[in-house]
């Protein structure tokens, strides 16, 4: 089994080393320095690599969080989505959002390693799920930077994308995200986009699982991949 320290989710299969993520080294793990940094970042972000039951999985959703906060509400929404995914759908959180280099078209010729990993993850997914805060009436730099790396990426064209807006009063970022994704020729699955009224509630990942919105999240994930390739 290939080690995949850069992702996590319901079907995560790599057992993390029994040393603190911050102390990972190439010698101890056999991972590259970049992978060590990446995993340490993912662990710090709360992507624990929890091993869970393994249903037969045929569809994969790649989740992108536009916040790097360790207690991000948007990250909690995506982690909850990962746990709520119906059988046959696996939601994997991309743990490298804060480690992608700032987009520069001149870097595309010799693609940075992490961008290549990101592209592979996007290409192998049946849909993308985005949850991101609004900063100063705009999308966050984190999500825009990640999307900029996909502008010229052919596999992104017609990719099915859903947006979960955990702060429905943040209308500017949501509108901009839709405009950006449409411009990039993504296939925005509007029926799978959700307004989730979690802002200011202090809701946790477990709280989301227990909330009345859990069924909506499940339904949205099914809709997101329902028209994806077989
Ligand atoms: C620098 C900054 C700017 C913000 N600007 C806005 C804004 O323009 N509109 C808004 O609705 N919320 C704004 N917020 C609030 C965040 O969108 C809100 O706290 C969000 O829930 C944070 O998401 P997270 O918990 O996933 O990090 C801002 C927060 C920060 C830190």
Image (tube, grey):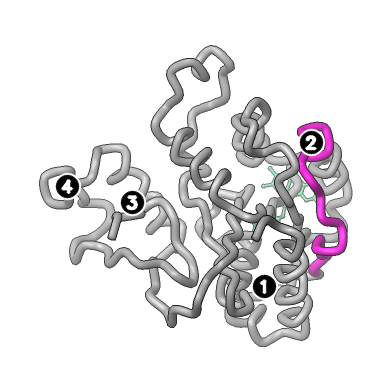
Q: Which residue is mark 3?
A: 40
Image quadrant in which you'd find residue 17: bottom left
Select label 3 or label 1 by which is in front: 3
Q: What secondary structure is found at the residue carrying circle 4?
A: loop
The numbered mark at residue 30 is 4
| Disc 3 within 8 angstroms of ligand 1 (CB) | no
| Residue pictured at 64% horizontal, 82% vertical | 209
Q: Quadrant of the N terminus?
A: bottom left
Question: Where's residue 37, x and y in %?
Answer: 32, 43
Q: Residues within 10 Å of mark 1 (few under 14, many from 20)?
A: few
Identify the residue shown where x is 49% and y is 80%.
55
Find residue 88 and report its image quarter: bottom right
Which of marks 3 and 4 precedes in the sequence?
4
Name the residue that disc number 1 marks. Answer: 202
Q: CA distance from mark 4 to mark 1?
A: 39 Å
Image depth: mark 4 or mark 3 in front: 4
Q: Residue 213, located in which quarter of the rendered image?
A: bottom right
Looking at marks 4 and 1 on the same chain, the residue that comes earlier in the sequence is marked by 4
Residue 156 or 103: which is nearer the viewer?
A: 156
Residue furthest to the top: 106
Instruction: Check whether the beta carbons of the residues at disc 3 and disc 1 lie within 8 A of each other.
Output: no
Residue 136 at least partly seen:
no
Q: Is residue 151 covered in magenta?
A: no
State how far apart marks 1 and 2 are (Cα).
35 Å
Label 2 crowd bin: few (<14), some (14–19), many (20+), radius 10 Å: some
The span from disc 3 to disc 1 (Cα, nearest Å) is 26 Å
Q: Earlier in the sequence, mark 1 or mark 2?
A: 2
Residue of label 2:
185
In the image, which residues are magenta? 180-196
Q: In 3D space, how far apart are the residues under numbered discs 2 and 3 (Cα atoms)? A: 33 Å
Q: Secondary structure at mark 2?
A: loop
């Amino acid at each position: 089994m290939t080690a995949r320290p850069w992702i996590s989710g319901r079907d995560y299969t790599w057992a993390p080393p029994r040393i603190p993520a911050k102390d990972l080294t190439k010698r101890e793990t056999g991972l590259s320095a970049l992978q060590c940094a990446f995993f340490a970042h993912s662990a710090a972000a709360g992507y624990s690599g929890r091993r869970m039951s393994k249903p037969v999985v045929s569809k994969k959703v790649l989740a992108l969080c536009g916040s790097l906060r360790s207690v991000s509400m948007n990250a909690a929404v995506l982690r909850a989505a990962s746990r709520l995914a119906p059988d046959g759908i696996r939601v994997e959180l991309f743990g490298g959002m804060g480690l992608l280099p700032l987009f520069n078209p001149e870097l595309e010729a010799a693609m940075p390693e992490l961008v290549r990993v990101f592209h592979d993850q996007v290409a192998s997914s049946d849909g993308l799920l985005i949850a991101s805060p609004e900063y100063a009436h705009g999308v966050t730099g984190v999500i825009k930077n990640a999307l900029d790396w996909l502008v010229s990426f052919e596999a992104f064209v017609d990719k099915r994308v859903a947006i979960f807006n955990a702060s429905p009063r943040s209308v500017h970022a949501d509108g901009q995200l839709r405009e950006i994704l449409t411009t990039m020729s993504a296939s925005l699955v509007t029926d799978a986009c959700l307004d989730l009224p979690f802002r200011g509630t202090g809701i946790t990942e477990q709280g989301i699982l227990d909330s009345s919105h859990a069924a909506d999240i499940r339904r949205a994930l099914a809709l997101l991949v329902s028209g994806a390739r077989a």
